[in-house]
């Protein structure tokens, strides 16, 4: 458990601090900076650091392209399956479950949950889906970790 706390700290900080900034409504400049300029700067530095240490023969090959295509397919199928299951749950519950929470089932934390919230609020401004969408969002992370563990144990 000692190694879990340092590993989980950035995720908890990101979820709590980012949502605190966004939902408090009193630090709009910080929210704008964190969503736009800061994210762009971090993305640029990450791209430069990874790009500077990567050799072309390790990236420009058939196996890398296959992994990228599998990733796109997995993300697309995961999102589509979540939306379809959300719609099924909506039908079975008599309309009590908002099908948008299914779209947050991918492990893109917390952006997928925020998109569900934003789209739900666009349709009905009284919709507050963020916390409901975070459940399947975090479950997607856990599911991804379990799936990776199974794949590693099967294929070594």
Image (cartoon, rainbow, N blue to C red):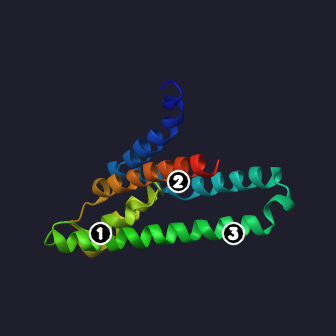
Element assignment for label 3: helix
The CA distance from mark 3 to mark 2 is 36 Å
Between tags 3 and 2, which lies in front?
3
Task: In the rendered structure, find residue 86 and report the number of the disc placed on it.
Answer: 1
Residue position marked by numbered label 2 in the rendering:
33
Rendered image quadrant of residue 113: bottom left
| Callout in the foreground (1, 3) | 3
Give the Cα distance between marks 1 and 3. 30 Å
User: Residue at 17% across / 71% down in the picture?
Assistant: 92
Q: Residue at x 55, y 71 (%)?
A: 73
The crowd level at tag 2 (other Cα within 10 Å; few <14, some 14-19, many 20+) is few
Closer to the camera in the image, 76 or 152: 152
Q: Residues within 10 Å of mark 1 (few under 14, many from 20)?
A: many
Residue linked to disc 3? 66
Tell whether label 1 touches label 2 (CB within 8 Å).
no
Vertical placement of 141 versus 4: above or below?
below
Question: Around disc 3, counting alpha carbons within 10 Å, would you say few (fewer than 14), some (14 to 19), or many (20 or more)?
Answer: few
Q: Residue 153 versus residue 59: which sits nearer the camera?
A: 153
């Amino acid at each position: 458990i000692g190694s879990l706390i340092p590993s989980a700290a950035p995720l908890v900080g990101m979820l709590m601090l980012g949502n605190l900034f966004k939902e408090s409504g009193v630090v709009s400049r910080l929210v704008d900076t964190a969503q736009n300029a800061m994210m762009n700067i971090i993305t640029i530095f990450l791209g430069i650091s990874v790009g500077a240490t990567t050799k072309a023969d390790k990236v420009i090959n058939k196996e890398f392209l296959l992994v990228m295509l599998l990733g796109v397919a997995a993300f697309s199928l995961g999102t589509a399956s979540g939306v379809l299951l959300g719609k099924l749950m909506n039908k079975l519950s008599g309309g009590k479950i908002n099908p948008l929470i299914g779209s947050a089932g991918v492990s893109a934390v917390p952006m997928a949950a925020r998109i569900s919230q934003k789209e739900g609020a666009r349709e009905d401004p009284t919709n507050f889906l963020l916390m409901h969408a975070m459940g399947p969002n975090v479950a997607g992370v856990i599911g991804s970790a379990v799936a990776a563990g199974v794949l590693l144990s099967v294929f070594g």
